[in-house]
Image: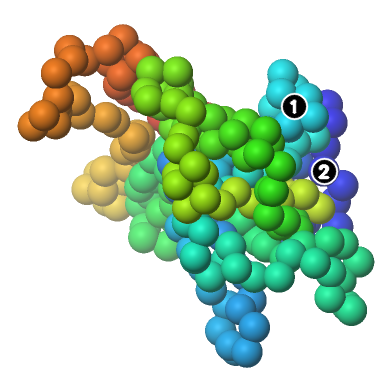
């Protein structure tokens, strides 16, 4: 199983047993998370900036590469946003080309309720990636990334919408390709871990409910636009049905550990 190399920066220290470094797990978390949080250091500002963005792992050179292979991260944004306007050439201190970024993705699978609040937890899958971002200028790669990101949100949506984008749409959209340097995931599943003293306290156990509340993302019934003329297509209804079913199944399985 191919993995990201462990470094001082990406090695999980607390609860080391929850640390995961293989490509497949990390890339799946990124592609499943509806929102990615991207942080960077703006010039002449002491505070780091964090932006919610959409993105997807992929490879323009090898479009059929599986999630278990080395991949780039493509981020979609508006052309005039701060991140898209940052320099993408190396500074004197950078060994790599591009803007240094940190990307976080988190999926919540359940609320874990223990006998005491101190042992409450959550079941989750999270990933943190570090890499260097460069602006995609090749039109073919830009189209590839736009289709990739669109279909990662709603499978088959690209082919079932008005494409290709117009020149204005292409010019107003920017795509960043992030070459990943290192990454790690942290995953928790299962029931609460209790304090041994509490477990032996029959009075406490007799009055406090413990367990897991499975948590998952669920889509509602599609609501047509006022000017819509088309019945709900299969790629839309299938997304709702499939994601709701699979997300619930995953959360309930995770609750059991």
- Asked if 143 appears above or below 137 in the picture, the reply is above
Q: In this orientation, does residue 147 appear? A: yes
Residue 86 is left or right of residue 107, and the answer is right
Where residue 236 sits, quadrant-wise, is: top left
3D distance between C-alphas at marks 1 and 2 = 11 Å
The x and y percentages for residue 257 are 52, 30
Q: Residue at x 68, y 48 (%)?
A: 136
The x and y percentages for residue 76 are 53, 48
Q: Residue at x 18, y 15 (%)?
A: 230
- Asked if 206 appears above or below 66 in the picture, the reply is below
- Asked if 58 appears above or below 243 in the picture, the reply is below
Q: Residue at x 54, y 30 (%)?
A: 147
Residue 4 shows which numbered tag? 2
Q: Quadrant of the N terminus?
A: top right
The x and y percentages for residue 18 are 66, 45
Q: Residues within 10 Å of mark 2 (few under 14, many from 20)?
A: some
Residue reaching furthest to the front = 167
Would you name the residue on which mark 1 appears?
Answer: 68
Where residue 245 sits, quadrant-wise, is: top left
Q: Residue at x 45, y 47 (%)?
A: 168
Whether the residues at callouts 1 and 2 have beta carbons within 8 Å, the answer is no
Where residue 7 sits, quadrant-wise, is: bottom right
Out of 248 and 182, give the one closest to the viewer: 182
Element type at mark 1:
loop
- Asked if 200 appears above or below 233 in the picture, the reply is below
Out of 51 and 111, give the one closest to the viewer: 51
Out of 18 and 50, give the one closest to the viewer: 50
The x and y percentages for residue 180 are 76, 49
Q: Earlier in the sequence, mark 1 or mark 2?
A: 2
Q: Residues within 10 Å of mark 1 (few under 14, many from 20)?
A: some
Q: In this orientation, does residue 245 appear? A: no
């Amino acid at each position: 199983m191919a993995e990201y190399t462990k470094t001082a920066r990406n090695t999980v220290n607390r609860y080391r047993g929850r640390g995961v470094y293989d490509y497949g797990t990390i890339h799946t978390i990124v592609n499943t998370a509806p929102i990615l949080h991207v942080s960077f250091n703006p010039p002449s500002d002491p505070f780091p900036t964090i932006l919610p963005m959409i993105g997807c792992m992929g490879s323009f050179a090898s479009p059929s590469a599986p999630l278990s292979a080395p991949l780039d991260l493509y981020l979609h944004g508006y052309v005039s946003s701060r991140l898209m306007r940052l320099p993408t050439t190396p500074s004197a201190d950078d060994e790599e080309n591009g803007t240094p970024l940190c990307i976080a993705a988190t999926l919540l699978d359940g609320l874990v309720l223990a006998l005491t609040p101190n042992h409450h937890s959550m079941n989750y899958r999270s990933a943190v990636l570090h890499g260097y971002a460069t602006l995609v200028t090749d039109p073919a790669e830009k189209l590839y990334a736009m289709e990739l990101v669109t279909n990662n949100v709603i499978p088959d949506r690209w082919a079932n919408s008005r494409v290709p984008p117009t020149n204005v749409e292409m010019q107003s959209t920017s795509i960043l390709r992030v070459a990943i340097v290192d990454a790690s995931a942290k995953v928790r599943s299962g029931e609460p871990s209790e304090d041994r003293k509490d477990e032996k306290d029959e009075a406490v156990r007799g009055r406090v409910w413990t367990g897991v509340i499975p948590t998952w993302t669920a889509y509602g019934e599609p609501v047509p636009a006022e000017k819509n003329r088309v019945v709900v297509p299969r790629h839309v209804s299938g997304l709702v049905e499939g994601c709701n079913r699979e997300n619930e199944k995953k959360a309930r399985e995770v609750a059991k550990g």
